[in-house]
Amino acid sequence: MSGSWKAEYIPLLSGRRFLITGANSGIGFYAALKLARKDAELILACRDPQKAEAALARLREEAPGVRAEVATLDLASLASVRDFAAKELERRRPLHVLINNAGVMAVPQRTLTPDGFEMQFGTNVLGHFALTGLLWPALEQAAKESAAPPRVVTIASIAHKRTLLNLEDLHSAKEYSPLRAYQQSKLANLMLALELGRRLRAAGSSIRSVAAHPGVASTALFRTEGRSTLIKALRTVIGYGISTFLNDEAEGALPTLYAATSPDAANGGYYGPQGYDEMRGEVVGPAKIAPHAKDEASAARLWEECRQMTGVNFP
């Protein structure tokens, strides 16, 4: 693949259902907007119902006729994930694309989820792992009913290159660094996406596991609530600089959209912007994977750890 890839290249998506976690802002919202303009049916799965409704209202303004609904989903809570998935499966409708987009970044103090997991690993990794597994019947239904292969799209990060996976301390109990915990969660996301791709190939499944990263984009991750005035100010300045010199949210959504819709997005593929050091650009292509993220033995062990922590087993 060469040259720029634009949202205009997305085919008509009538009759296809997309579920996007964290779709109320940032990359998730802009991915939803572009998909809505191609007649996709959308589920905006968000933690905050008010923000989700506001995003839906904005979608209706910018994409008249959009077919979308909101649903409450807190990925930090396995109970919330199970409740959401159970309600979705009760509808007996196929799910064509699951975009695991939501995330938290650099939580200042080590914080635990209601299930006792470190917040970033529990939300970014375990919440999405459980959601994917619990919604697997809907993806399999789509595989049976649709000619287009269903997809699980995992949003990773170039931050995965900057740390190693510590399988003995996935929850940063021995030593906590806000940024390192985030980097480890993104590394785990990518390793699990690659592992899922291998498992799908071995099973002969038509479902694809595709990963993507936005480069460096100004998103809500740089405007996290619950921080000091100084930290908020610094993050605002950083976010402005990123949107000016690197990617804004709309540009950052392009790799996600490519992974979710392009016929060239392969099972086990990983895609991102092709600008300087993969940090920006409208050209989307294969992204670089750090050698340690390709460790199949560690990925298999990580998968087993996630299975045991969540109680969810798939595919």
Image (cartoon, helix red, strand yellow):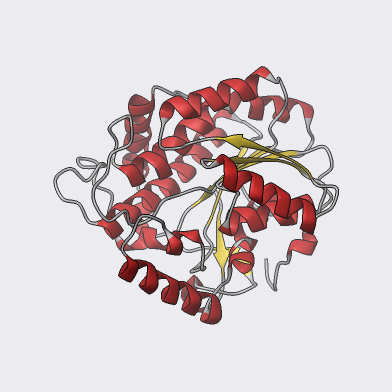
What is the x, y in percent for residue 116?
27, 32
The residue under the point 78% across, 44% down is: 40
What is the x, y in percent for residue 315?
52, 27
Q: Quadrant of residue 49?
A: top right
Please state which of residues 259 and 95 is positioned toward the viewer in this rendering.
Answer: 95
Can the viewer see residue 262?
no
Please state which of residues 221 and 10 is positioned toward the viewer in this rendering.
Answer: 221
Q: Quick one: which residue is furthest to the bottom in this view?
A: 245
Up-down relation of residue 265 to residue 14 (above or below): below
Q: Quick one: which residue is furthest to the top in this view?
A: 90
The residue under the point 20% across, 40% down is: 168
Can the viewer see residue 284?
yes
Q: Quadrant of residue 14?
A: top right
In this rendering, position of residue 224 left or right of residue 14: left
Please state which of residues 55 and 193 is positioned toward the viewer in this rendering.
Answer: 55
Up-down relation of residue 88 to residue 213 (above or below): above
Q: Quick one: which residue is furthest to the left in this view?
A: 174
Q: Quadrant of residue 123?
A: top left
Please state which of residues 76 and 196 is positioned toward the viewer in this rendering.
Answer: 76
The residue under the point 42% across, 58% down is: 224
Viewport quadrant of the N terminus: bottom right
What is the x, y in percent for residue 153?
58, 46
Up-down relation of residue 312 to residue 77 (above or below): above
Number of on-image labels = 0
